[in-house]
Amino acid sequence: MRITAITLDRLRLELDPPLHAAWDPDPRRHFDATIVRVHTDDGVTGIGSGDTMAGFEAVEHLFLGQDPLDIVRHV
């Protein structure tokens, strides 16, 4: 099984009213998250979530063609 594609859905949840977190002096007005889908040549798609994944496109090629279960390599 090999990774054929990785798709990212970047999402933003607007917070109204803003969240006043005890550890942050600035109210949080939105929450950003990314849904990550790892597609394989066996037709299996793994789904996870992450932060904004900013800059991922620059390193995506390092994952394509690799074994999706080789977690140590991917870390």
Image (cartoon, rainbow, N blue to C red):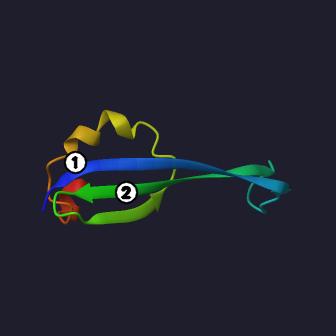
Q: Is residue 72 left or right of residue 55?
A: left
Of residues 12 and 42, which is closer to you in this image? Answer: 42
Q: Is residue 15 above or below residue 69?
A: above
Q: Is residue 75 left or right of residue 30?
A: left
Residue 63 percent location from the top left of the image: 22, 48
Residue 75, visible in the rendered structure: no
Farthest-out residue, top: 58
Q: Residue at x 20, y 54 (%)?
A: 3
Of the residues under marks 2 and 1, which one precedes in the sequence? 2
Q: Residue at x 31, y 57 (%)?
A: 38
Q: Is residue 4 above or below residue 56?
A: below
Pointer 2 with pointer 1, Cβ within 8 A: no
Rate crowding at label 2 as few (under 14), some (14 to 19) or many (20 or more) other CA atoms within 10 Å.
Answer: some
Q: Is residue 40 above or below residue 57?
A: below
The image quadrant where one finds the N terminus is bottom left
Residue 9 percent location from the top left of the image: 49, 49
Tell me the kind of residue under disc 1.
Phe
The residue under label 1 is: 63
Tell me the quarter of the picture where residue 58 sits: top left
Q: Is residue 74 left or right of residue 35?
A: left
Provide the secondary structure element on which disc 2 rests.
Answer: strand
Tell me the kind of residue under disc 2.
Arg
The dot on residue 37 is 2
Residue 49, visible in the rendered structure: yes
